[in-house]
């Protein structure tokens, strides 16, 4: 089975682990640097990006995650996880860092407060049929640089999903609706990389 980590410092770790397990992956709740070894992929969950950033430094996970991104490990970030994979943030809390990797700028809390949370259905490039999407104090992708590609937008044109190489990021939480197809995409990337490395 593919071995997929879920960064488990804060946020909706269990929902992601449940989907990955249902898709046949072996999941690892990553809290220590050595747990990054031997992973085929990593999910960065939703939560609070400034807290996850801070804890990643306290728990010595920042360096291994940066190394894994540089090494091409497939990763999928939802909401706070997308923020952590973005090269630039608008509305960063003082001193907040990201891991980067996606050539995008994201605006934190772009839809207002918790009450602005909403559910909708979206078209996502490469996925047949509507994708159920829950937005919770979600970021908006306000700039898509030349190395990244927008794969989903809201009706008003706001970009809410991107991919770049082995990195995937969505403003929304598919895991809250039992929507599995973005995780399947991560597993496809992880499988392709494992095959390429074995060759
Ligand atoms: N607003 C949160 C942040 O900036 C993200 C919210 C979420 O992950 N649902 O990190």
Image (spheres, rainbow, N blue to C red):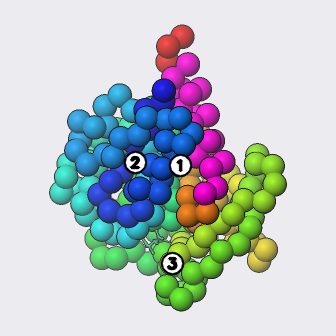
The reply to whether the magenta stretch includes residue 180 is yes
Q: Which mark is residue 19?
A: 1
Residue that carries the numbered disc 2 in the rendered image: 6
Residue 133 image offset from top left, x and y in percent: 65, 66
Callout 3 crowding tier (Cα within 10 Å): few <14, some 14–19, many ≥20: many
Q: CA distance from mark 3 to mark 2?
A: 21 Å
Residue 62 image offset from top left, x and y in percent: 28, 49
Residue that carries the numbered disc 3 in the rendered image: 137
Name the element at disc 1: helix
Name the element at disc 2: strand
- Disc 3 within 8 angstroms of ligand 1 (CB): yes
Give the vertical position of 145 relative to 20 (above or below).
Answer: below
Q: Is residue 129 left or right of residue 197?
A: right
Residue 57 image offset from top left, x and y in percent: 22, 56
Callout 1 crowding tier (Cα within 10 Å): few <14, some 14–19, many ≥20: many
First of labels 1, 2 by sequence position: 2
What segment carries the magenta color?
A: 178-195
Give the vertical position of 88 relative to 4 (above or below).
Answer: below
Give the residue at x 53% y 68%: 106
- Report the quarter where the C terminus lies: top right
Q: Which mark is residue 89?
A: none
Q: Is residue 184 left or right of residue 29?
A: right
Q: Is residue 170 visible?
A: no
First of labels 1, 3 by sequence position: 1
Q: CA distance from mark 1 to mark 3?
A: 22 Å
Q: Among all residues in the image, which is located at the extreme right?
A: 129
Q: CA distance from mark 1 to mark 2?
A: 11 Å
């Amino acid at each position: 089975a593919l071995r997929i980590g879920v960064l488990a410092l804060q946020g909706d770790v269990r929902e992601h682990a449940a989907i990955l397990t249902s898709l046949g992956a072996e999941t690892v709740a990553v809290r220590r640097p050595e747990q990054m070894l031997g992973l085929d992929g990593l999910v960065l969950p939703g939560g609070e990006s400034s807290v996850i950033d801070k804890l990643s430094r306290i728990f010595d996970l920042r360096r291994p995650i940066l190394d894994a991104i540089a090494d091409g490990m497939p990763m999928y970030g939802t909401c706070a996880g997308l923020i952590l994979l973005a090269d630039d943030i608008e509305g960063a809390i003082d001193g907040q860092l990201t891991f980067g990797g996606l050539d995008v700028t994201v605006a934190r809390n772009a839809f207002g407060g918790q009450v602005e949370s909403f559910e909708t259905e979206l078209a996502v490039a490469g996925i047949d049929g509507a994708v159920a999407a829950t937005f919770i104090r979600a970021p908006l992708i306000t700039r898509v640089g030349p190395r990244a590609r927008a794969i989903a937008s809201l009706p008003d044109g706001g970009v809410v999903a991107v991919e770049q190489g082995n990195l995937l990021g969505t403003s929304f939480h598919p895991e809250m609706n039992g929507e599995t197809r973005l995780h399947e995409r991560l597993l496809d990337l992880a499988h392709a990389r494992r095959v390429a490395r074995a060759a």
